[in-house]
Image (tube, rainbow, N blue to C red):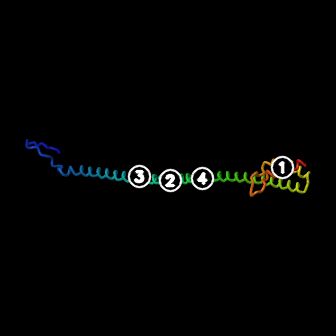
Amino acid sequence: MKFEKRADGGEVTPASSETPETGKKPVIIYILILFLAAFLLMFLSMLSHQRSNTEALGQLQNSVSAIQEIQTTQEQIIELQKRLDETEAERDEAKEELKVISDSISDLEKTSQALLALYNLQQEYLTGNLDGCLLTLQEISDQHLDELLPSTNTEGVTPPAQRYQELKEAILNK
């Protein structure tokens, strides 16, 4: 406010060029504009942060989905590994069983050969073919078939190992 001094020495009165309300209005409007601009900037900042947060949330959800897929895949891999281990164990057991069966078949084939050689020896002895008997005895001895002949007695029949010894003694004593 401006104060004017009167020449007559009177009282000092405020200058009439400005009214008190008129001087305050531009300041209030200026402050309102500043507040509106500040609120507008805050609103724009909030929208920007909202958009940024939405994008970040989307990326996080994608990451979570990817991690869940990886976890599911890892669980499947673990399950498949367990099944593979079980299958390999079954395969190893089957190999062992096959080996046992193969060995058993091989032993049975050798025993069968020994019994067949004993049968041939008996037939040659019964026909009186002494040279054939000696040849068969030599084959049985060379192939160690005499060791494979069963020595157990079944149903009152002479065991094959004992019968072989009897035939061998009879042939060698002739």
Q: Quadrant of the N terminus?
A: top left
Q: Is residue 7 left or right of residue 115?
A: left
- Tag in front: 3 or 1: 1
Which residue is situated farthest in the front direction here? 156
Give the distance between the C-alpha atoms of the residues marked 3 and 4, in whole angstroms: 49 Å
The residue beneath circle 3 is 53
The residue beneath circle 2 is 66
The residue beneath circle 4 is 86
- Tag in front: 3 or 2: 2
Q: Residues within 10 Å of mark 2 (few under 14, many from 20)?
A: few
Type of the residue with mark 4: Glu
- Tag in front: 1 or 4: 1
- Tag in front: 2 or 1: 1
Q: Residues within 10 Å of mark 4 (few under 14, many from 20)?
A: few
**Callout 3–callout 1 Cβ contact below 8 Å:** no
The residue beneath circle 1 is 140
Give the distance between the C-alpha atoms of the residues marked 4 and 2, in whole angstroms: 30 Å
Choose between 165 and 156: the one closer to the eye: 156
Q: Secondary structure at mark 3?
A: helix
